[in-house]
Image (tube, rainbow, N blue to C red):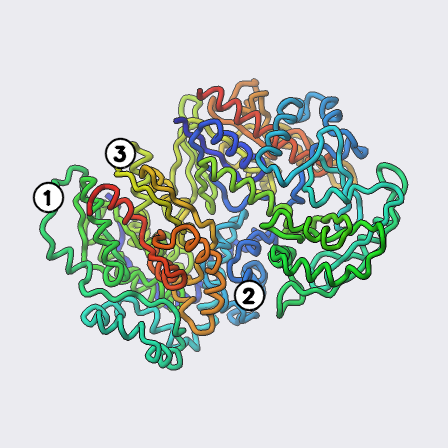
Amino acid sequence: MTEVNDRPATTAKAGLEFAGHELSRASLDSCVKCTICETQCPVSAVTPLFTGPKFIGPQAERFRNGESVDHSLDYCSSCGTCTLVCPQGVQVAELNSQARAVMKADHMPIRDRLVSQTTLMGKLMTPVAPLARWALGNKPIRTLMEAAVKVHRDAPMPPAQSQTFQSWFASRPRPATVPTRGTLVFFHGCAGGYFEVETSKKTVEVLEHLGYEVLVPRQGCCGLAQQSNGLFDEATASVLKLCDDLRSSGKDLTIISSSGSCTGMLKHEAHEIMGVSDDRLADVGTRIRDTMEFLLDLHDAGELPTDFAPMPMTVPYHAPCQLKSQGIGKPALEVLRLIPELTVVDSEKVCCGIAGTYGLKKEKYEIAQAVGRPLFEMVKATNPDLALCDTETCRWQIEQSSGVKTVHPIWMIHAAYGLG
Amino acid sequence: MSRVVVIGAGLAGLVAANRLAAGGAKVVLLSKGLGGLQLGQGTIDVFGYAPERVSNPIRTVQALPGTHPYTRVGATNLLAGLAYLKELVPDLLVGDPEANYQLPTAVGAIRPTCLAQPSMVAGNLGAGDRVVIVGLRQLKDFHPQLVAENLARTDLPSGGRAKVRHLLVDFPAREGEIDSSALTYARAFDDPGVRERFARAFIGELESDEIVGLPAVLGVSDPNAWRHVAEKLGHPVFEIPLPPPSVPGIRLNEALTASAKAAGVRFVPGTRVFDFRASDRRVGSVTIAVEPAGREFAADAFVLAGGGFESGALELDSHGRVRETLFGLPLEGADAVPLIHGDYWGGEQPLFTVGVRVGSDLKPLDASGKPVYDNLWAAGGIIAGSAGWAEKCGDGIALASAMAAADSILKELS
């Protein structure tokens, strides 16, 4: 069992002071100006408004002393691609996220505070799901919303559900199978709790089918949306509260999540971007696995049953940026290839454009659409009825912009195991 | 199925991964980031200077002394590697191991290389050729007057000189940008409509029989973009590679990556391999430095193809000690005195030939000549004994060693 000390949360002040001064800044001297990050940046590929990760990151960082030297920094979507591709280990995206938090600190738009309230949105929308769905699909209302809070009228919104995952989990009949493989903790995240309830259910059902007992502690938000909007104080409090929640189920259990981006927040972003240095975070970060990563690990160990029913179809798969940045490759691709007669086509596209809340914003919407356009075209051309992607906001973006129903890869595993 | 971990995504790593996967191994390719191919010219240098300009690279390789990596790897593997690479990317590389191309560079010098992209080879000039170098006013890093004037006063390796002039065309890649990168242009040139407008912009200024030299920005996804431009101009065209971001390098990197993925190679990029486990002279696993606790990859065989100093695979500390940073392998040439001499314009620095000594099967050897680990192979820039940039032999060594290592692994694991 891991022994940890419960220390107080890192404060906002410490978070902003950390920005640009520790881990990431130490990496900027490794930049050899090779331009590899620039060639892969999905934003500068579609607009000259963003001058690219190398210029905004390691180059501009040398001239920053609190004040940012170039405000095109705000056009960085924080997708993390630059860090992923850097062959010298420079934390380009982290530098940019930190600098943006400092830049916005004294004039944070109300909109950015609102769109990062993911738990609140879920709590408000679930009891009035049909109304919420109607309102968010209503043009005049969305136009008013765009004018009032600068959330683009055509941007994807979370699909309101009538039942939360927690309520389903508490009220469902006990699973028929007896656990033989031990116990796992399930982290559903805000989206998986309130909006992508079906993905959470299917994940739990697959894990139980494999022989695990699944515990679901009461849990809050990981703070990712706050972090990506520069609200480091709020995000730090959220992520550490979540660590306490998840640790309440047992301190040495593996934690599983189908929310790829929230998993990334716990594994590395809270530490690398906000400088949260807390044993609770390190403990949870070490034990958490993305669902498909967990299944691939089982398969690599020869422990994943592969009695999958054939699924004679071709589906496009898009690996989200925040999954790719976890250093696990694209586990869904490997696992899905175990299903007979299923052809999975990797989109090989850098980003869908949404980047959390970036693509919702009125002034970024067109850029986000241009970033995602090659992906939307690929998806439509590969299968007009179904696409796969591991994270929620990316799925909403792909579905809204391509018109193709987009689900988590666990849906295929669930179906191929004959679980309904 | 045998599992192989390949470390590194440059030419050596990608070729080894392709060959291993095609041979039936289950391959995971681990890399810190994108490999270095797109920092190069998108060509394959086999031997350029020995030290005088080389015209027949394979003959030069066959005459090398025993300490050179080529001698250890063998010319047979080199020839097989060149043939294999052309098979992997059939539309992207042409050339003959018996004859180097001599191609103009972005400063108007002439560079020997063995395999080149079809879009470049009209730049292999002969005496009296009439050439016009065409630049784009909004493109960074390409100065047609510099290229033209230098090229005009250069004696061609085949004898004589070309007659060279230049043109500068006002042709933005996209609205709102006055200093676009080569890649921004290349993406624009993937659009046939852009190519037609571009050709119309200066066709009237071309003189009959002129060969048109252009910066290497003629499309990144469309392999026939350059042919379309040539057809619209009615003149032969050739591309001149630019400093990074190198579009021909990106083409080569993307093609080799795509073929590896199609062959089933699993890519795990973005994280440095920093640790390993071994027992009984066998490597059991390597660990990547993913936050927060690392991630282990077990395999039956491992290929170290992480390059040299440029990528951190070799490191020089402040005490003048050189270290191979992952396995701590014994290094050849590391005891040279001095490792770095003070004559900046003098001969090669001994430091740059430091590397791992390998046997003919490409396993790193210890001082007694035995493999350090029975299931560890090395390929590419980590191998001791040559200065790739001086001899222009780095690509060929990467290719030949990747080929030999992969074949040795497939043989042992079968």
Label 2 belongs to which residue? A47
| Amino acid of disc 1 | Ala
| Chain label for disc 2 | A
Examine the rendering and report whether any part of residue A80 can be seen. Answer: no
Do the residues marked 2 and 1 share a common chain?
yes
Which secondary structure lies at badge 2?
loop
Q: Which residue is mark 3?
A: A303
Residue A376 shows in the view: yes
Q: Amino acid at mark 2?
A: Thr
Residue A176's disc number:
1
Q: Are marks 1 and 3 in contact (CB under 8 Å)?
A: no
The image shows residue A37, relative to residue A140, as above or below, that is above
Nearer to me, A376 or B141: A376
Q: Nearer the viewer, residue B77 or B390?
A: B77
Which kind of residue does numbered mark 3 sit on?
Answer: Glu
- Comparing labels 2 and 3, the label whose residue is closer to the camera: 2
Q: Position of residue A362 (x, y in %)?
A: 43, 74
Q: Residues within 10 Å of mark 3 (few under 14, many from 20)?
A: few
Residue B181: x and y, percent? 64, 58
Residue at image point 34% right, 68% down = A116
Q: Earlier in the sequence, mark 2 or mark 3?
A: 2
